[in-house]
Image (cartoon, rainbow, N blue to C red):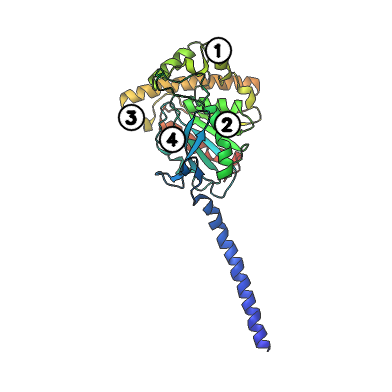
């Protein structure tokens, strides 16, 4: 009888150990499962993106733009509620966000507990709400309402299907996207706790700024600068100048950077004409970022400004800054 009881006791102990072991083993599997299934989207179901690393290509309906907007999304590894919005440059395509094409951000953040949010499209848009159709082709009008999409239409979708909090987000961008990131964070401080600008243009209303924007938008796809924020005297131009709206960034984590415009070893692989363009554009980004930083320092907007000794306006510079700031992003967002 005692032997039977002993066997039963041993069996019970073994079952308890196996149950406990199962709980330990299943926990990581449950966490990984946050990335293992495709979410619903506005056209049915998201698709696995060709970049891999659990990136899903989802469409989100935008009433403001009256169309489905593709968004590449990498869910947080362990179902965390932090989001990282990653904005593209002037020549953003309708095929892919450059952060997973020219730099593989999905691979960089594959082990981290933050959801990457990478909107596709928005060429020359500055990710803002335009006053009028964006191009001169009035037979095929292009409606740009990116501010509305990124701050009002996309967050409920991300919260419902990816668990991203509407108030626990970081936002970054390169070049045009850097300008937009600062503006969006300043205009929507409750949504974004952190903002990072890599080689952005941070003083858009300085003398000659409207002319420079006009030339850039024409070169970037024949877009009409006056359709964006109006004429040079329109109040919206001043509302969307990072140099003028920085006060709203107080209490947020702010990082701005630019290269020197001096070619480094990594830039030697580019064609001479591309190096020349990269030198010119990065010098402008450097000058405007330095001016922004100087005013922020004087007015008490805490921030970090980094000016690398070399670096042109290219993906070696942008990607290097993403790698350098990854620990900062994860620390601030508590998303390791």
Labels 3, 1: front one = 1
Percent across and percent down for residue 242 are 56, 21
Total number of numbered discs in the rendering: 4
Q: Distance between the residues labelled 1 and 2?
A: 23 Å
Residue ID at (44%, 45%):
47
The residue indicated by pointer 2 is 151
Front-lying residue, 25 or 332:
25
Percent across and percent down for residue 257 are 51, 28
The residue indicated by pointer 3 is 270
Residue ID at (39%, 35%):
95
Front-lying residue, 168 or 166:
166
In the rendered structure, which disc, 3 or 2, sits on the residue that comes first in sequence?
2
Q: How far apart are marks 3 and 2 (CA)?
A: 37 Å
Q: Distance between the residues labelled 3 and 4?
A: 22 Å
The residue indicated by pointer 1 is 234
Residue 199 visible somewhere in the drawing: no
Q: Are marks 3 and 4 in contact (CB under 8 Å)?
A: no
Label 2's element? helix
232 sits to left or right of 301: left
Q: Distance between the residues labelled 3 and 1?
A: 39 Å
The residue indicated by pointer 4 is 97
Q: In this view, does 139 lie above or below 49?
A: above
Labels 2, 4: front one = 2
Percent across and percent down for residue 128 are 52, 24
The residue carrying pointer 4 sits among few (fewer than 14), some (14 to 19) or many (20 or more) residues within 10 Å by Cα, namely: many
Front-lying residue, 148 or 101:
148
In the rendered structure, which disc, 3 or 4, sits on the residue that comes first in sequence?
4
In the rendered structure, which disc, 1 or 2, sits on the residue that comes first in sequence?
2
Residue ID at (51%, 48%):
111
Q: Is residue 24 above or below residue 320?
A: below
């Amino acid at each position: 009888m005692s032997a039977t009881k002993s066997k039963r006791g041993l069996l019970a102990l073994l079952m308890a150990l196996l149950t406990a072991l199962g709980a330990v083993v299943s926990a990581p599997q449950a966490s990984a499962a946050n990335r293992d299934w495709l979410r619903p989207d506005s056209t049915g179901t998201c698709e696995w993106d060709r970049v891999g690393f659990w990136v899903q290509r989802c469409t989100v309906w935008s009433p403001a733009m009256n169309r489905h907007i593709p968004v590449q999304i990498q869910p947080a590894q362990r179902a965390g509620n932090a989001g990282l919005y990653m904005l593209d440059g002037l020549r953003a395509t309708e095929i892919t966000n450059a952060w997973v094409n020219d730099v593989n951000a999905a691979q960089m953040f594959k082990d981290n507990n933050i959801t990457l949010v990478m909107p596709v499209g928005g060429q020359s848009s500055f990710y803002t709400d335009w006053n009028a159709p964006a191009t001169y082709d009035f037979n095929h009008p292009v409606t740009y309402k990116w501010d509305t999409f990124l701050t009002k239409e996309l967050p409920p979708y991300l919260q419902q299907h990816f668990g991203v909090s509407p108030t626990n987000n970081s936002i970054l961008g390169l070049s045009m996207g850097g300008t937009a990131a600062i503006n969006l964070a300043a205009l929507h401080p409750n949504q974004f706790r952190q903002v990072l600008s890599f080689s952005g243009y941070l003083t858009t209303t300085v003398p000659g700024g409207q002319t420079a924007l006009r030339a850039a938008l024409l070169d970037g796809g024949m877009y009409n600068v006056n359709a964006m924020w109006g004429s040079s005297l329109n109040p919206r131009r001043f509302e969307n100048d990072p140099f003028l709206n920085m006060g709203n960034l107080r209490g947020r984590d702010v990082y701005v950077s630019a290269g020197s415009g001096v070619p480094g070893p990594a830039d030697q692989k580019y064609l001479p004409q591309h190096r020349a363009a990269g030198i010119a554009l990065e010098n402008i980004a450097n000058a405007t970022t330095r001016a922004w930083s100087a005013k922020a320092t004087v007015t008490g907007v805490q921030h970090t400004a980094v000016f690398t000794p070399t670096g042109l306006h290219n993906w070696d510079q942008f990607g290097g800054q993403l790698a350098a700031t990854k620990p900062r992003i994860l620390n601030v967002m508590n998303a390791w």
